[in-house]
Amino acid sequence: MTWKGTLCGIAVLAGVLSPSAVSAQAPSCTISVTSVIFGNYNVFSGTALDSTGSITYQCNATAANITIALSKGQSSTFNPRRMNKGAELLNYNLYRNAARSNVWGDGTGGTAVYSRANPPNNSNVNLAIYGRIPAAQDVSAGNYSDTVSAVINF
C-alpha cells in the first residue's frame, strides 16, 4: 500500500501584541508515514494476515489538541477498506490497537482517531498502525493496493 502523509492545520496567534511584544510562534506539526506491507496472502490459510506500519509526527510547543486521522482510501466505507487489483477487491483494515479491534479512521462511523492534548515539544512521536487482511477471501494472485491518507490536525 502507498501512504500519503498530509499536513494541515490552522495557525492561530493568541493574545494582544503591543509594538514592543515579541510575536508568538504559530502552532506547527509535521507527519510522515511508513507503509503497511502485508506481503503474500494465502487464500487457503485459515488465519488472518497481520502487518504493521508507523506514523511519526512532531509538533512545536504551541501545537495542542492534535488528532491524526486515516482516510477510507479507495473504499466507500472504513469497514472494510478494500485493496484492488483492477476490478478484484481484497478486504483489509487498519487499526489503532494491537488487538485490531479499533478501526483507525476519522472518528465517524465507530472509527477511532489518535488524539493528544499536549504533544511533546519538537520531539518525534512514533505510532504503530496495525493492519489485517481477514482469512478466507477467494481472490486471484497479483498485487493489490490502496492509498490511504494520514492527516494531522492541530
Image (cartoon, grey):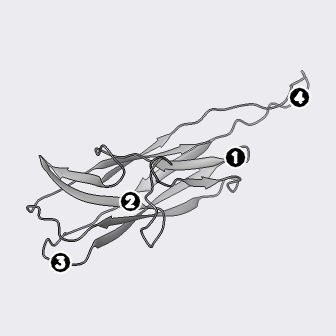
> Which badge, 3 or 2, comes first in the chain's sequence?
3
Q: CA distance from mark 4 to mark 1?
A: 23 Å
> Which badge, 1 or 2, comes first in the chain's sequence?
1
Q: What is the residue that sits farthest to the left in this orientation?
A: 140
In the rendered view, tell whether residue 134 sits above or below residue 79: below
In the rendered view, tell whether residue 42 sits above or below residue 25: below
Residue 78 drawn at (x, y percent): 36, 50
Dot 4: few (<14), some (14–19), or many (≥20) neighbours within 10 Å? few
Disc 1 marks which residue? 64
> Which badge, 3 or 1, comes first in the chain's sequence?
3
Does the residue at mark 1 contact the one at mark 2 (Cβ under 8 Å)? no
Q: Between tags 1 and 2, which lies in front? A: 2
Residue 83 drawn at (x, y percent): 23, 53
Q: Between tags 3 and 1, which lies in front? A: 3
In the rendered view, tell whether residue 113 sits above or below residue 29: below
Classify the position of the N terminus by image quarter: bottom left
Residue 58 horizontal side relative to residue 69, left or right? right
Which residue is at a point 38% across and 67% down the rendered structure image? Answer: 52
Does the residue at mark 3 contact the one at mark 1 (Cβ under 8 Å)? no
Helix, strand or loop at disc 4? loop
> Which badge, 4 or 3, comes first in the chain's sequence?
4
Disc 4 marks which residue? 21
Disc 3 marks which residue? 45
